[in-house]
Image: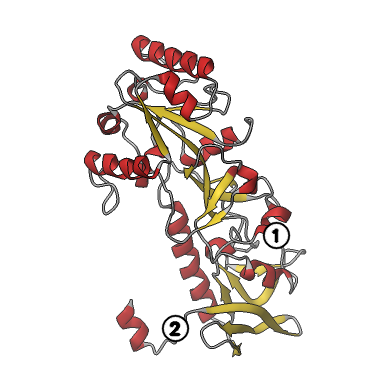
Amino acid sequence: MANLIIKRAVKLQFKTALVKLLTTEDQVTGAIVKDLKNDEFIQINASKGVILCTGGYSANKDLLKQWNPVALKKNVYNDSPRNNGAGITSALNVGAIKDEEPAECIFDRGLVPVGTKTGDMYVQTATYKDWLWLASHPLLKLNMRGERFANESIPYQFIVNAASKQPGYLYSMIWDDNFSEYAKQFHMLGCARVGFPGYMASAQKLREDTQQYVDKGLVVKADSIEELAEKLHLPVKTVKQSVKRNNELVVDNIDKDFGKEAFRLTPINKKPYYGCILGGRILCTFDGLRVNKKMEVVNDQFDPIQHLYAAGNDSGGFFFGSYPDRVPGLAASHAQTFGRLAGQQAAEN
């Protein structure tokens, strides 16, 4: 790709923010952008078209309040700090329409200090701060009242969605010292699986990753369930009942309460015991601009806005609600495919 860019004399300009689109009569003719490094504005004229690929709006709290307010309650971290919605809002300003229902990709790995209130926390991070890999595994998860509330064997985002219907929006996860062995039997998908290249290459790596948060105090350890519940600020009696029920289901080899697969049922009976408090971390938003089959952005009459295209998370009409994590890589392949199609269509003008 780098060689092709050089061969085609493509100009790449980084640290450049979209300010607004330029129009003449009924078509887009270019854009005003800001060179953030030199603090100056630049006009770019486009004879064939402008393709918007600036990402969603997960870093823009004002837009989240307007278009997806519950995201600010479900999520404690935002892992796409440059996704400020500029592409979408610029298009709306020239007559475009966007999806009406919010859609997003959320990871269930938002590790927070005990006592955190979700309404007080929405941390912008470019380095996946306090990202607990183990949190995506189907270990016992309890609401803030110490009650099990969902089947833990569901895609990343779905446990966060379930927690959003519980008191406080956050939830806890409890497990025992055999967790690295349990991980080998879970058959996780995508980046949650042990053996994922470059991230979680082995069960030992998973243990090391978890230990760093024990050292940091975000994962707590205890020699009894009572002590663990107290450290997590959860009702001791209810947590003990939930753990007892979990262990009964393991012995019966069937989850009579929520239907988790038998091979993902694991006991909590080997000291030390571990626990933490979790929330969502939003990776991106998907409710973008409405486009037609040519990737042309459309107006409220569903007619194309001439010379304006969108791809990636700037484009909508593809995802709805929650990212389907049973199809790992779908967002990346969607962006790659739609981006290519947009480029082809613009080049034909």
Q: Which residue is mark 2?
A: 12
Element under label 1? helix
Q: Residue at x 31, y 41 (%)?
A: 211
Closest to the camera, between mark 1 and mark 2, is 1
Circle 2 packing at 10 Å, graded few (<14), some (14-19), many (20+), is few
Looking at the image, is 252 positioned above or below residue 341? above
The residue closer to the viewer here, 225 or 151, is 225
CA distance separating discs 1 and 2: 30 Å
Amino acid on which disc 1 is placed: Asp
The residue closer to the viewer here, 145 or 313, is 145
Asked which quadrant contains residue 212, the reply is top left
The residue closer to the viewer here, 225 or 168, is 225
Asked if disc 1 and disc 2 are in contact, CB closer than 8 Å, the reply is no
Instruction: In the rendered structure, find residue 232 and report the number of the disc placed on it.
Output: none
Amino acid on which disc 2 is placed: Leu
Where in the figure is residue 79, as x and y percent of width and height? 49, 56
Where in the figure is residue 126, as x and y percent of width and height? 46, 61
Q: Which residue is mark 1?
A: 62
Looking at the image, is 5 positioned above or below residue 54? below
Element under label 2? loop
Q: Quadrant of the C terminus?
A: bottom right
Asked which quadrant contains residue 20, the reply is bottom right
Circle 1 packing at 10 Å, graded few (<14), some (14-19), many (20+), is few
Relative to 225, is 78 on the left or the right?
A: right
The image's colour scheme reads: secondary structure
Where in the figure is residue 186, as x and y percent of width and height? 32, 31
Q: Residue at x 64, y 63 (%)?
A: 289
